[in-house]
Image (tube, rainbow, N blue to C red):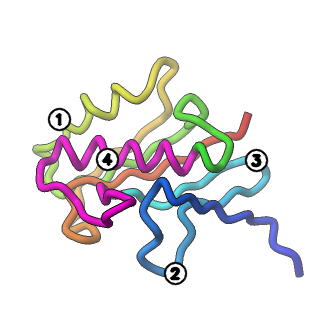
Amino acid sequence: MMSNKTPVQTNDAPDAIGPYSQAVITEGVVYTSGQIGLDPETMTMQDSLEDQAHQVMQNVKAVLKEAGCDMNDVIKAMIFLKDMDDFHHVNDIYASYFKEPYPARSAIAVAQLPKDARVEVEVIAKQS
């Protein structure tokens, strides 16, 4: 049976650290896995929230680019925060990567993120 899922993989974003794809495309829709602030070259993460948030967004951009999309194609974003008190800082950084009309979005606090990251973002985008 043929799969209608096409995996996405780029060296410009961190390698998957588990049994998952960086993203999957099906019927022209791109579903990314959550991206944390790992530098794809060193697989290390900066301590500062701002550095992590920018790296997260750069990782999302890289995966989308490999899938033939850009940030303007994002229709839904999900932000996971280790601490909801970080929301306004992450929100400002997140906003700098999008323009109107903005995608739909959720932001939730979670108990812990992989590698003790402070922020994780996943998106859904529609190929143009």
Dot 4: within a 10 Å radius of its alpha carbon, few (fewer than 14), some, or many (20 or more) residues?
many
The label nearer to you, 2 versus 4, is: 4
Q: CA distance from mark 4 to mark 1?
A: 14 Å
Count of number-bearing discs: 4
Q: CA distance from mark 2 to mark 4?
A: 22 Å
Choose the circle earlier in sequence order: 4 or 3.
3
The residue where tag 2 is placed is: 19
Image quadrant in which the C terminus is located: top right
Which residue range is magenta in the image?
36-64
Label 1, secondary structure: give it.
helix
Residue 83, given in percent of the width and then of the height, sits at 14, 53
Q: Can you say which quadrant of the picture contains the N terminus?
A: bottom right
Going by the picture, which residue comes out furthest to the top? 100
The residue where tag 3 is placed is 28
Q: CA distance from mark 4 to mark 3?
A: 26 Å
What whole-number distance in Å separates the C-alpha atoms at marks 2 and 3? 23 Å
Q: Residues within 10 Å of mark 2 (few under 14, many from 20)?
A: few
* Amino acid marked by disc 4: Gln
Q: Residue at label 1? A: 89
Q: Which mark is residue 45?
A: none
